Image (cartoon, rainbow, N blue to C red):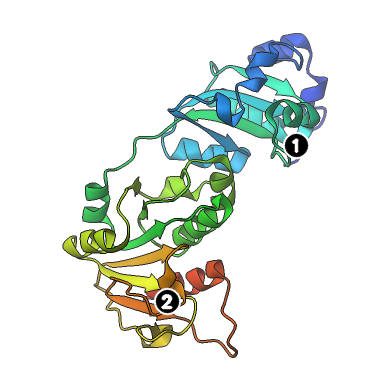
Amino acid sequence: MELAPNQPTISQLTPSQLAQLDLTPEGAEEHFLESFAAEALAPDEFIAEGPAVVERAIHGGCKPRRLIVRNDELFFDDLQAFRTRFPHVPGRVATRERMAQLIGMNGLRGMLVVFERPTVASTDQLLATATRLLVLEHTSLPGMQGSFVRTAAALGFDGVLFGAGCVDPCARRELRASMGNLFFMPWSQSDLEGRALMDALAQSGFTSVRLATKARSNAIPLGELGIGKSQRVALVIDMEDPSLASTAPTWADYATYIPTATERCLPLEKAAAIVMWKLFDRG
């Protein structure tokens, strides 16, 4: 984003200009910066990192509580846009190095905003409204979970259910990996897993499809998976499920895999993306 001619960068702002944006220069109120550490967040808070994720959190109706912005001209316009909408949210300016030192985060994307956690739909509400549902179990890696969510949003899924063993959907790294796409879809959390989860999906009228990473006795190739356009489908991905690559029962209506040219299987994230594309194929 280019700056207008003669527009000051954040580092060139005078104390009075900082005051107009309700920002305090680096070094003031060090405890304010420390409040962005994960362990310092209140139970009803989460952090959005970077202007894109911040914007999508706002789109999702989340309320900002405080921000810090890197002392860099790249984020001047983003800061002004944020301040126009939220002039009274307390904020501070800091260098990238200072932010990393105090917060323990590297590779920052210039802006951190602490938000109030959104109101989440109940599992019953989600199961009653979704038609293409992503169901995750035991996705203990934030980056991978975020990748699943981002792919589901891109391919037209209209809901995500985080089952037992998933990381916090609003974790900073998860939101960074999903680029905030979580806030574009209804989602919910549940303690159900395994057979109990499959039973709940069936009772709500879903056809459940469990992803297997390679051929197994009770799985069918993706190309032979017959799913009608009008069917409500739940794609189930469980990183700890032995059915990913064995003959263990799936408890789902179908288990499917992507045939490969060798015995090696695709990475789980890539396989999931292909199956999501297939399930949303309207052609």
- The reply to whether residue 232 is visible in this rendering is yes
Residue 227 vs residue 150: left or right?
A: left
Tell me the SS state at disc 1.
Answer: helix
The residue identified by callout 1 is 74
Which residue is at 54% across, 66% downward?
Answer: 269
Amino acid under disc 2: Lys
Towards the viewer: 146 or 156:
146
- The reply to whether residue 280 is visible in this rendering is no
Residue 155 vs residue 172: left or right?
A: left
The residue identified by callout 2 is 278
> Spatial distance from mark 1 to mark 2, Cα to Cα?
39 Å
Residue occupying the far top of the picture: 16
Tell me the SS state at disc 2.
Answer: helix
Residue occupying the far left of the picture: 203
Residues tagged 1 and 2 counted as in contact (Cβ below 8 A):
no
Tell me residue 43's x, y (percent).
Answer: 44, 27
